[in-house]
Image: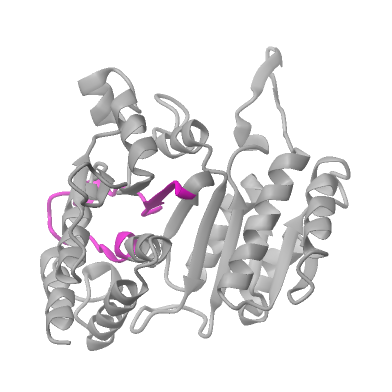
Amino acid sequence: MVSRQGALTITLIPGDGIGPEVTRAVVRVLAAAGFSPEWETFSAGAEAVAEHGTTLPPALLESITRNKIALKGPISTPVGKGFTSVNVGLRKALDLYANLRPVWNLPSVPSRFQNVDLVIVRENTEDLYAGLEHTVVPGVVESLKIITEVASTRIAEFAFDQARRRGRKRVTAIHKANIMKLSDGLFLDCARKVAARYPEIEFDDRIVDAACMHLVMHPERLDVLLLPNLYGDIVSDLCAGLVGGLGVVPAANLGFNGVGVFEAVHGSAPDIAGQDIANPTALLLSAVLMLQHLQLDAKADAIMHALKKVLASGHVTPDLGGKATTTSFAEAICHELSSK
């Protein structure tokens, strides 16, 4: 994280499609907020395959391991063929066991609900996403759902620590232990044991299908959600939909010793790449999470204040119903930062 010259060094993965455009915009806003680290820039995914023969070059992984912090734009993942997800590869290679997705309403962002303020904590390393599957006989495929006490306990501890740090009042474990009594049952049991060590934070649990119903009826009644990998992937996107979509929510993948990859989780939108109309809000919010992780709260707060003012003014990109370009949206945020 700190170079030999004493400057903060961060790994930068612009991504593909609209990734380079939104990344440039976010780096510009960070600089306007007084945050100008040394950036080590790397390709990943299809571009890295063409250059290095692998989606995750060893030099990229070494950079993140050394710097501990990475900011990552969207990267395309082929569906049903081609290379595996770069996101999954990063999580496995760096043991980024916790996915953190705060979700809340932003000014002038159309949504079906108001007063949504959720924190989704997703276990990142196992469950069905371990990718352990094989053909039993032709026409029959078996996928293995892996749940361990170690992984379930550490993600529960992460969720309760986040609740404590953020002043949250309740953690809700989401599961299907009524059917998968051993696997989801173990996840739930670990959560209950961890909850006993945080008496100031309320704990309850909900079956995943019922939890989804409650989220689309009364999302304001929930607080911190704790989920295994597959349910967490689905429910975190559902929650993003409550406040306007993946283009307006941040994400962080966190591991031990302060290692973190902060990323936009929306697609790379190749159909609009190069048109300067992509919305950089999701990556900017992820950069705000990065600043908070680095304990640079004043800079994070300044960016949030400026972003909210620009959104409230209606100077927004086409996906939010406006006519702003990626560049002009970033310039407006920079102007708000400089006028403080």
Residue sitting nearer the eye, 22 or 77: 22
Residue at x 28% of width, y 67% of height: 319
Residue sitting nearer the eye, 299 or 170: 299
Q: Using the image, determine if residue 28 lies above or below residue 38.
A: below
Residue sitting nearer the eye, 55 or 64: 64
Is 47 on the left or on the right of 122, as rendered?
Answer: left
Q: Position of residue 251 (x, y in %)?
A: 44, 57
Residue sitting nearer the eye, 306 or 265: 306
Is 239 on the left or on the right of 295, as rendered?
Answer: right
Camera sees residue 325: yes
Count of numbered labels shown in the rendering: 0
Q: Position of residue 310 (x, y in %)?
A: 23, 82
Is 30 on the left or on the right of 170, as rendered?
Answer: left
Q: Using the image, determine if residue 165 lies above or below residue 50.
A: below
Most distant residue in the top direction: 137
Q: Which residues are magenta?
A: 258-284
Is 64 on the left or on the right of 140, as rendered?
Answer: left
Residue at x 69% of width, y 42% of height: 151
Residue 14 magenta-highlighted: no
Q: Position of residue 16 (x, y in %)?
A: 24, 41
Q: Which corner quadrant holds the C terminus?
A: bottom left
Residue at x 72% of width, y 46% of height: 152
Q: Position of residue 337 (x, y in %)?
A: 18, 79
Camera sees residue 323: no
Residue 283 magenta-highlighted: yes
Q: Quadrant of residue 83?
A: top left
